[in-house]
Amino acid sequence: MTPEDVAAHASGLPRCKRKGTASRPAWYVDDRLVVRLEDATTLTVRSTFEARERLLAEHPETFGVPPAMERHLKVQVVLDHGNDDAIREAISAAYELQRR
């Protein structure tokens, strides 16, 4: 998955608006983070703890939790491991979480 793919998917979600900077674009619903591009190969995605644990178990090469993120409802994503469908699902789940 590329940063452009992330942008296309996030921008296609209703009410999901791009913010952030040119180097760190992010997409929000009602000012609540859905996904943010940290660099060319890394995302931060909003997630429940339960969903995060499932993602870590199913795709440990793609999803991770750095120590600074452990207490937060977020998961870090490496884009270039070929799990595009899982990444899209994580972004869509983050979107649904923020719509509540």
Image: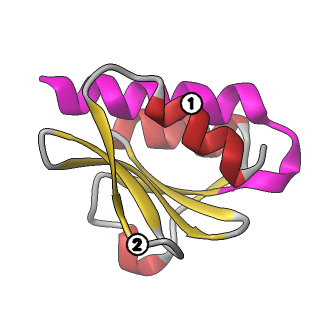
Image coordinates of residue 86 in percent, x first then y, are 67, 29
Q: Is residue 72 above or below residue 53?
A: below
Residue under the image location 29 percent in, 52 percent down: 73
Q: Is residue 40 above or below residue 75?
A: below
**Nearer to us in this view, 5 or 80:** 5
Q: Earlier in the sequence, mark 1 or mark 2?
A: 1
Image coordinates of residue 76 in percent, x first then y, are 54, 60
Q: Which residue is mark 1?
A: 9
Image coordinates of residue 23 in percent, x first then y, are 53, 76
Q: Is residue 31 left or right of residue 56?
A: left
Q: Secondary structure at mark 1?
A: helix
Question: Is 35 part of what is drawn in magenta?
Answer: no
Question: Is 88 part of what is drawn in magenta?
Answer: yes
**Nearer to us in this view, 45 or 71:** 45
Q: Amino acid at mark 1?
A: His
Question: What is the crowding at mark 1: few (fewer than 14 residues within 10 Å), some, or many (at least 20)?
Answer: some
Residue under the image location 61 percent in, 46 percent down: 56
Q: Secondary structure at mark 2?
A: loop
Image coordinates of residue 62 in percent, x first then y, are 73, 51
- Chain part drawn in magenta: 78-100
Q: Amino acid at mark 2?
A: Thr
Question: What is the crowding at mark 2: few (fewer than 14 residues within 10 Å), some, or many (at least 20)?
Answer: few
Residue under the image location 76 percent in, 33 percent down: 84
Quarter of the figure with the N terminus: top right
Write down the quadrant of residue 5 in the picture.
Answer: top right
Residue under the image location 41 percent in, 26 percent down: 93
Q: Main secondary structure of the magenta part?
A: helix
Q: Is residue 11 left or right of residue 88?
A: left
Q: Which mark is residue 21?
A: 2
Q: CA distance from mark 1 to mark 2?
A: 18 Å
